[in-house]
Amino acid sequence: MMDQPLRAILWDMDGTLLDSEPVHRLSFVDAARACGLTLPADFHEGLIGKSEDAIHAILAAEHGLTLSLAHWSELRFAAYLARIEEVHPFRIATDLWARAQAAGLSQAIVSNSPEGIVRANLTRLGLAPGAVRTVSRHDVRRGKPDPEPYLLALARLGLPPETVAVVEDSAAGLAAARAAGLCVYMMPWFEGPAGDWQPFAALSSRLPG
């Protein structure tokens, strides 16, 4: 697969392009507190990469949340936006993004976050919403680890999977990308077992030029 010339990169967003996972964790705590709920300190650790609807289902089944998904998402989104200034880009990721752009590669963001959070994060990256191709949780029936988000991104790019790389940081994202037939590069802080993925640093050598 890596023998094919690289033509595009699909990026996960949270924990990949942006150091946003701490703010996501705090936004869950803040939103739950507003509902009168107290979450365990390690609540967010097992949810990295999961979609909003999947996390809502866990909160309802295990922690007593009674709000609908729509009302919970509105509350959680507001809690995230209240801390948006605490979200910062990962320099190693944005540097490679800039190099890929200069090399003429197509790029897109494929995220399990809802559209509103994707747009807010784009602004933190200095990217204009609408100027970057994105796939959010609102665009698909099933989020990661289902391959649907990455398959949709491939269809929108009109490229075969062997010419496209993915950058991810979570097990759910890795599973989704691999099921879509894509070569995956994991961020240095990924702590999953060795498997069918490449280290992020190896992607640099595939850039044209």
Image: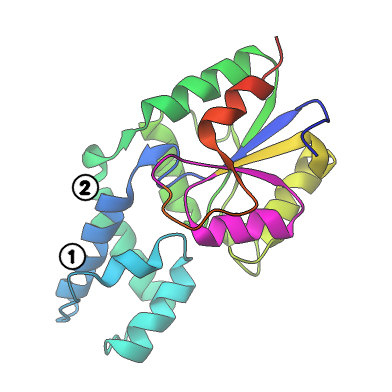
- Segment tinted magenta in the rendering: 168-189
* 106 in relation to 165, above or below: above
The numbered mark at residue 83 is 2
Q: Nearer the viewer, residue 191 or 29?
A: 191
- Residue, x 56% and y 16% (percent of image)? 99
Q: Nearer the viewer, residue 31 or 181?
A: 181
Is there a contact, CB below 8 Å, between mark 1 and mark 2?
Answer: yes
- Residue 189 screen position, x and y as percent: 38, 44
- Residue 111 screen position, x and y as percent: 53, 51
137 displayed left or right of 78: right
Residue 176 in the magenta stretch? The answer is yes
Could you tell which of marks 1 and 2 lies nearer the N-terminus? 1
136 displayed left or right of 90: right
* 20 in relation to 171, above or below: above
Q: Which quadrant of the figure has residue 35?
A: bottom left
Q: Which quadrant of the figure has residue 175?
A: bottom right
Residue 200 visible in the current orientation = yes
Q: Quadrant of the N terminus?
A: top right
- Residue 182 screen position, x and y as percent: 73, 47
Q: Give the residue at the far front of this rendering.
A: 194
Pointer 1 residue: 30
